[in-house]
């Protein structure tokens, strides 16, 4: 019986981050619970009312969603960064950490993301930046749409990510 080799730190980080994707997605779904309609769907009107509310309870509910959204986008970026290092991509060898869009483009060029996935990640990343920096231009509808988009595309992103790594001899299992 062959012994498996010990994982290097970036591989170990990737495995741990990958394992946390599903729980983080579930946490985001739980956080949107206060904004659910009678059918359990994320309701845009309830969201928009809470997003602009000055009631402390609504602020907490909104912050839970936006915080988990930002954390999940950060998580995806960190997974891509670690994988780029493992792949030896030039973008990961620089002294200065690449921007999200630079990283997404490099992973795309290496076959890890489709052009559409790059566009989606750029959009999600831009909204995360606006939320993180409390941009006055961020609108409830934009965040609503991007939370929905993140939840809708996360599984496909994870599948592409795993397949890309496997094609390059990196296994997460």
Image (tube, helix red, strand yellow):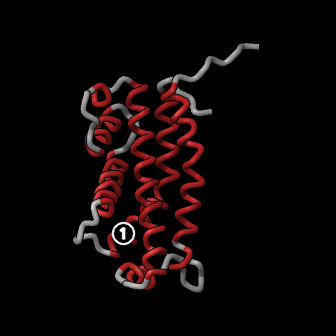
The correct choice, above or below, for 160 with respect to 57 in the image is above
Q: Nearer the viewer, residue 3 or 95?
A: 95
Q: Nearer the viewer, residue 34 or 44?
A: 34
Residue that carries the numbered disc 1 in the rendered image = 143
Is 158 left, or right, of 120 in this rendering? right
- When asked about the image quadrant of residue 132, the answer is bottom left
Is 58 left, or right, of 101 in this rendering? right
Residue extending farthest front = 56
x and y percent of residue 12 in the render?
Answer: 55, 30
Residue extending farthest right = 1
Give the position of the C terminus as an image quadrant.
top right
- When asked about the image quadrant of residue 172, the answer is top right
Tell me which residue sits at (34%, 82%) in the image. 52
Residue extending farthest left = 137
The correct choice, above or below, for 104 with respect to 142 in the image is above
Is 15 left, or right, of 97 in this rendering? right
x and y percent of residue 139 in the render?
Answer: 29, 74
Give the position of the N terminus as an image quadrant.
top right
- At label 1, counting other C-alpha atoms closer than 10 Å, the crowd grade (few under 14, some 14-19, many 20 or more) is many
Tell me which residue sits at (32%, 42%) in the image. 104
The correct choice, above or below, for 5 with respect to 152 in the image is above
Q: What is the tally of numbered marks visible in this picture? A: 1
- When asked about the image quadrant of residue 110, the answer is top left
Tell me which residue sits at (27%, 60%) in the image. 133
Q: Tag 1's secondary structure?
A: helix
Tell me which residue sits at (33%, 47%) in the image. 118
x and y percent of residue 15 in the render?
Answer: 57, 36
The correct choice, above or below, for 155 with respect to 60 in the image is above
x and y percent of residue 150 in the render?
Answer: 44, 59
């Amino acid at each position: 019986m062959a012994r498996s080799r010990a994982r290097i730190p970036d591989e170990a980080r990737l495995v741990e981050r990958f394992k946390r994707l599903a729980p983080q997605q579930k946490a985001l779904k739980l956080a949107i619970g206060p904004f659910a309609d009678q059918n359990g769907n994320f309701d845009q009107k309830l969201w928009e009312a809470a997003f602009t509310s000055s009631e402390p309870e609504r602020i907490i509910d909104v912050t839970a969603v936006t915080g988990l959204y930002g954390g999940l986008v950060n998580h995806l970026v960190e997974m891509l960064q670690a994988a780029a290092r493992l792949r030896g991509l030039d973008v990961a060898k620089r002294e200065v950490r690449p921007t999200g869009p630079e990283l997404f483009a490099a992973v795309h060029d290496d076959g890890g993301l489709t052009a559409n996935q790059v566009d989606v990640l750029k959009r999600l990343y831009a909204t995360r930046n606006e939320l993180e920096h409390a941009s006055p231009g961020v609108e409830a509808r934009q965040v609503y749409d991007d939370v929905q988009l993140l939840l809708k595309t996360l599984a496909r992103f994870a599948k592409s990510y795993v397949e890309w790594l496997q094609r390059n001899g990196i296994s997460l299992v």
